[in-house]
């Protein structure tokens, strides 16, 4: 989708006419839209400015890099890497890509939208996976609120760099298990 297809510049006063395929609804979308409008009104339209504001925004929400874990299977690394970029096809992400799906709500609890953060930190199976994981690794309970908390959790391990690396790999495998479990249930 090109910017030119999204916007129509009103010749007289330079007002933008938004042409949505779907109105922005969620808090995040509305916030992004507002920021986009702010960029347009202060700078006039500039691809560079929009790009810059998007990069700055991303930087606050996601760790800039994903550290590949060499000893776990590639498919597990890819799942965690995509989760980190919020690029896993959860229901919310499918709708964002204009895929026609009946609902974006979490198929299990039905109380929240199925986002990456919800699926990996609040979804009932995920909670059980993490609590079993705690017990198995013999560490105090871990509390995750966002996907990036999961990928940062190895930093809490205080048994040396080797233990940290092993823990990081196990976390990545657990993420893959959660994603696989979610897909196997037929969603
Ligand atoms: Zn749920």
Image: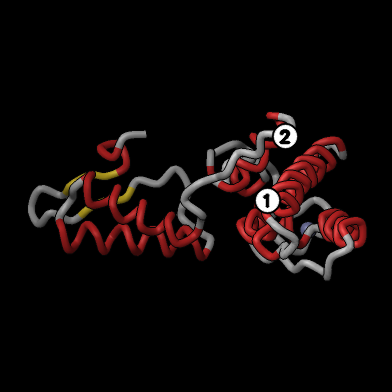
First in residue order: circle 2 vs circle 1: 2
Observer-nearest of 45 and 135:
135
Q: Which quadrant of the figure contains the N terminus?
A: top left
Image spot of residue 15 (x, y percent): 18, 56
| 122 to 14, vertically: above or below | below
Is 32 on the left or on the right of 37, as rendered? right
- The residue drawn where x is 68% and y is 60% is 153
**Total of numbered circles in the picture?**
2
For residue 64, say whether it is visible: yes
Question: Disc 2 marks which residue?
Answer: 71
- The residue drawn where x is 22% and y is 57% is 40
Q: Quadrant of ligand 1?
A: bottom right
- The residue drawn where x is 36% and y is 51% is 55
Question: Disc 1 marks which residue?
Answer: 104
Q: Which mark is residue 67?
A: none
- The residue drawn where x is 53% and y is 39% is 97
């Amino acid at each position: 989708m090109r910017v030119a297809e999204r916007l129509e510049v009103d010749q007289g006063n330079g007002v933008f006419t938004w042409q949505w395929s779907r109105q922005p609804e969620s808090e995040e979308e509305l916030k992004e839209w507002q920021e986009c409008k702010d960029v347009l009104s202060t700078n006039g339209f500039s691809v560079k400015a929009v790009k810059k504001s998007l990069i700055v925004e991303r930087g606050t929400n996601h760790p800039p890099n994903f550290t590949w874990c060499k000893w776990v299977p590639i498919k597990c690394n890819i799942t965690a890497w995509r989760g980190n970029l919020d690029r896993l096809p959860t229901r919310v992400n499918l709708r964002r890509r204009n895929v026609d799906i009946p609902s974006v709500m979490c198929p299990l609890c039905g109380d929240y939208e199925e986002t990456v953060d919800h699926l990996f930190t609040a979804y009932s199976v995920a909670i059980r996976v993490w609590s079993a994981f705690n017990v198995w690794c013999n560490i105090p309970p871990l509390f995750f609120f966002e996907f990036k908390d999961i990928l940062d959790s190895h930093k809490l391990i205080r048994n040396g760099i080797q233990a940290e690396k092993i823990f990081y790999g196990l976390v990545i495998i657990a993420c893959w298990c959660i994603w696989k479990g979610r897909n196997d249930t037929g969603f």
